[in-house]
Structures are given as C-alpha cells and as structure tokens.
Image (cartoon, rainbow, N blue to C red):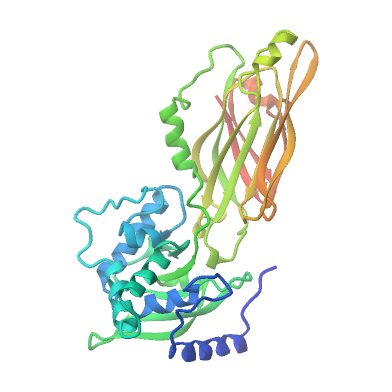
Amino acid sequence: MKRLLPLGLLLFALALTACEGQKNRLDPTPADNGLFTLSDVARILSDLPLERDHLAEVHDAVSASSGHGYDEEYLLSDLFNAPGAGVGDNGESTKAGGYATPLRDLFADYFARTYGTKAGAADVERYIDELSGSDMQIYWPFSQDWDGKSFPIVTFDPGYGAESNYGYEVRIDASGAHVVDSVLVTEQVAMERPVWVINRNDDAAFTPWELFAEEQTKAGKDNKTTTAENEYIFSICNFKMLRHYDSWFAGASEFFIKTGAVDGFKATKDEELKNYSPSMTDFMVVVRRNQLGKKIPFNAVLLTNFTDQMEKIAFMVIEDDGGTTTSWKCSAVVKYNSKQYGFELEIPYKDKDDVVWRGQLTRNYFKDLFDKGGGTLTSRLGDVEITFALE
C-alpha cells in the first residue's frame, strides 16, 4: 500500500530541513550508517553552482544508462570516477574530450569551501570517497523530454511508498544569480519539468535484455541452430507492463524473466537421460515510468531447440524488490516412449520480490503455433503481457 505525505508533515519537513541546513550534517546516521543521507546529497547538489554543461553531463549519463537497458540513472561512483558514463559503460565515459568542469569538481570545491575550515584535506577526500563508494545515484525520470536548458528540481526518495516529497527548485534569476526554492514534488511535476531524484541503485549488477542480447549474439545463440522438423527457437518478442510496481521515486520496475528447461531434449532410451540436464535463462527487463501500458519490443531467445519431447517449461516473472535469496523448486518435464520425466531445478529469487507469475508453460499451450509451423502468441501473465514466438 502506497502512502502519501500529508501536507502537515510536508510543512514540518520543510521547516526541519531549513533548520538542519544551519548545522553540519556530516555525521554518521542510524539510517544508513554513513556520512550522508539521501536528503543530504539532494541539498548539497542543489547548492552547487550548476550550469547547463552540468545538466548536459547528467543527461549524457542517464541517456547512456537507458540505452543499455537500465533506468535513467547516473551512479555517483561514475560521477566521481567517469563523468558522463552510464550504467553499462563499464566505468568509461564516452564523452569525447570530457567535460571542462565536471560535477565532481563542484563537489570537491563545495566540500573544501564549506568544511575546509573545520576539516583538513583528508576529511574532504573522505567525504568524496564516501559518496563515490555509495550506492546512491541521480535518477532523472522522463529525461527524454528535457528541452536542453531547463534547470532541475532536486529531491530524494523519502521511502515508505510515498508519492510526494519536498524538493529544491534550482533556477537562474534575471541577474544571473543561482536561486534555490523549496517546492512540492510529485510525479506529475516530473512529467512537466526536469526533476533529479537522489535514490539508491538496485539494478547495476544485473543484465538487462539489451546486454543479454549482445551476449547471445557473441555466443552465436541468436543464429538458428535447429535443423530437424518440428524443432523451434523459442523466444520473447515483446513485453508490456500493465501497472507500476514501485513508487515513482524508486524509479523503473525491474522484471526478471527466468526459464528452466531441458533445451534440445531428444533422448530415445533410458541410458541417454544422463546426457541431459536442465538449463536456466535469466535476464532483466527494465520498464521505465513512461512505458506503462506500452509494448516493449525485443528478441530474447529462451530456448534454441524446442523439441517435440519437451512437455513443460518452468517459467517465472518477478519484479525485483530485494531481500533474502530463496528459490522456487520446480521441474522441467520431458517425454519419450509415452513416459514423462521431470528434471528437478531451483530458480532463485528474493523473498521480498513481487512474484508476477510462475508456473509451467506446456507444449500443448503452444499447439496451434506448432501446427502452423511457428508464429506468435500473446499471454496475460499476472499484470504483464508477454508475446512468445516460435520460429
């Protein structure tokens, strides 16, 4: 259940923030056992003397992340170590010539100026190392609509499924002065103007389908390997999310698609069973906020040899929310000589994940496609629609 931030609480938070701005917040906090909270970073970022080149740097990074199949995000680790690099760039900026004054320089100047009289250079470096080594990031929803010049509102994820929060509106007034005002931020505001959300990254360690497809290409798995009649390549050709799974402050929904099967099973006698074992396909589909209800086209191969003897395929779709690793114990079923055999397997997921759908896809479910010699079939699985293809 999502919770809205009441107006009274919002006004209290604004007042509290104004008071906190008058003292040094760089003390360990119980919330995250670090020097900085998300709200600290949002406040600091809004105080930096931002120029359009800095906005372009953030936009370059979130666009690169998005292009690799991740959310519209700029890791602080990349901000300090590879300005302009997105998730999936492997810590290497693609900006030719770099940036004249990257954001990391503004942070360094800010710490030296603000805390330099109270702390030495070692402490300033410690502040930078703390941010660089954190899992924090700048999330820019609807970044594709940026006009190339508007300054952002900077806010942070308040947690608890909240849909609104206070933020810092950054603007340049008629005299050219840097002005910061406190404003209420909702997703509707983020649709209409740039909003940077400081939140935590939770998808950089996983493989989105765009990079999964590249790995398939390198391995040659996207080439047709079936040669016998009634053997097919089994794939997903599009994916549609029918509802959001997270608060907009948390970013996109990350769906993990997991398939377990005995690919290419062709045994004809008992002793051949030992030659086969189930394999698992596991990749991530990131659905950004503006993609709700839209078909996301892609070509992810689940099986390279879907044969006549493969009766049931284990299939699972989850939306990632973390937690302790557990597993779904299931089986991939094959048949020969009128007998069915189940190969047991365990498909891992986290105990806090939303299980969108899990079960077995049967050969009979795709009978019409087999009879026609291939084609596509769209299935409603929980709150997503997936179009499967046989070719």
Percent across and percent down for residue 1 are: 70, 68
- Residue at the spot 19% in from the left edge and 55% down from the top edge: 97
The number of numbered discs placed on residues in the rendered structure image is 0
In this rendered view, identify the residue nearer to me: 236 or 122: 122
- Residue at the spot 63% in from the left edge and 83% down from the top edge: 6
Q: Is residue 161 left or right of residue 119?
A: right
Residue 340 image-quadrant placement: top right
- Residue at the spot 41% in from the left edge and 76% down from the top edge: 153
Q: Among all residues in the image, which is located at the extreme right?
A: 339
Q: Can residue 148 be seen in this view?
A: no
In this rendered view, identify the residue nearer to me: 203 or 213: 203
Percent across and percent down for residue 135 are: 48, 61
Residue 63 image-quadrant placement: bottom left
Q: Can residue 213 be seen in this view?
A: yes
Depicted 187 relative to depicted 282: above or below: below
Depicted 365 relative to depicted 265: above or below: below
- Residue at the spot 49% in from the left edge and 45% down from the top edge: 208
